[in-house]
Image: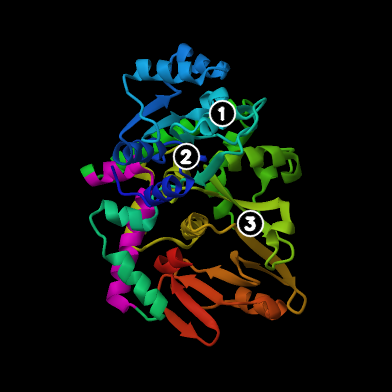
Amino acid sequence: MFKRKIYNKLLQWKETSQGKTALLIEGPRRVGKSTVVEEFAKNEYESYILVDFYKASPETKELFDNLSDLNYIFLQLQLTYQVSLKERKSCIIFDEVQLCPKARAAIKALVNDGRYDYIETGSLISIRKNVRDILMPSEERKIQMYPMDYEEFRWALGDEVSVPLLKQFYEDKKALGQAANRKMLRDFRLYMLVGGMPQAVDTFISTNDFRQVDDIKRDILSLYEDDFHKIDPTGKISAIYDSIPAQLMGNASRYQVSSVLTGNRAADMLEQISELKDSRTVLVSYHANDPGPGMAQNKDLTRFKLFTADTGLFVTLAFKDRDFTENDIYSRLLNGKLQTNLGYLYENIIAQTLAMNGHELYYHTFLNEKSKHNYEVDFILAEKNKITPLEIKSSGYKTHPSIDIFSEKYSSRIKRKILIYTKDYHREGSIEYLPIIMVQFL
């Protein structure tokens, strides 16, 4: 099993909750939820039962139809899984709990009983049909699980030194030096290509073969397609997801729903976008109509950009309908020869990194009255009672007209001004030039 940061969150929950809440881990398929939870239960409890509702028998699922006799339920689980449960020293895991909504609804009674700890895992768990007709337990604490971040990826490769050193340079606001920056950028580009899905990372480590890694990612995308069709048999959600690379490549100021689904506008697809967001396979960046600390209150639900939750999957999705040998992104990105029109890969990895750090995603477009030119700020971070605009360059270019004009317009709201690019750390006036490899510390 790979070392994952979420393990520490599980430890914190166990220590602070003391059996008074259940923990629900939500995330897309194949992100590693089941693996980390079972490893945690093995290490931190004297015994555990893992109920995988994908494989569980109808009789096991029916146990949760009637909660009047919890003793009977516990006895049946122990008999079925041949595990002896010990009061306050055992854990019961409900894996893929969205497949048995009544088990999730039973959490209230089970937690109030107090004998054991409970961890739930699920994908598509917020989708409406998976929560229909059940009362959500207030005793449930949710945490989101993402693909492996860059530091976890480096850990998997046996490197526990690079990221802490890089963080020290970031905190000290010092340049790495050209050679070190080039080396770290090359390592980071490798992460962008492989991605953070544990199965893809494992395949890369064992084979050192991008084609085999790509095959794994295609398998994951096929699973997502199956899920999308279960959510929406019309195929609209699937079409929206498949078009994410083309939409970003088009460099439009928003996702153009009408170009993907003829006759449909964004306003007509709010429900599907919400379902897609709840699947945790995508990240949604909304237009902030009035960029400030309260952006959540004035976001425009009809103006948005979509990113994939894992940039490695993005690379494969962009060329899903072609053979691997035609996918020149791998060689171009790895060798630092990315074409200008492939710069959207950097936008996706930044969106992914910011989301992993707990940031809501917002952007802003505006017309400059003097020049009559449209400008766009790629991302806006809310920091206390101020905002920080981010402008992205997929190269070493240091021009920043969008930040300049945006900061002039909203001068009283600005905390920092950051241009993200591929060169070394640099500060010039009020602008910070931040290497893309340091975005993980924002």
Residue at disc 1, secondary structure:
helix
Q: Residue at x 62, y 73 (%)?
A: 402
What mark, if any, has residue 252 been given in the picture? 3
Question: Mark 2 belongs to which amino acid?
Answer: Gly
Q: Report the magenta residues as a range.
A: 176-205
Q: Nearer the viewer, residue 42 or 184?
A: 42
Q: Residue 366 location, x and y as percent?
A: 72, 68
What mark, if any, has residue 109 been given in the picture? 1
Measured along the vertical axis of the image, is residue 51 above or below residue 390? above
Residue at disc 3, secondary structure:
loop
Measured along the vertical axis of the image, is residue 292 above or below residue 153? below
- Please give the residue where the numbered disc 2 appears in the rendered image: 19
Question: Mark 1 belongs to which amino acid?
Answer: Ala
Residue 14 lies in quadrant: top left
For the view shown, which residue lies furthest in the bottom direction? 429
Q: Are marks 2 and 1 in contact (CB under 8 Å)?
A: no
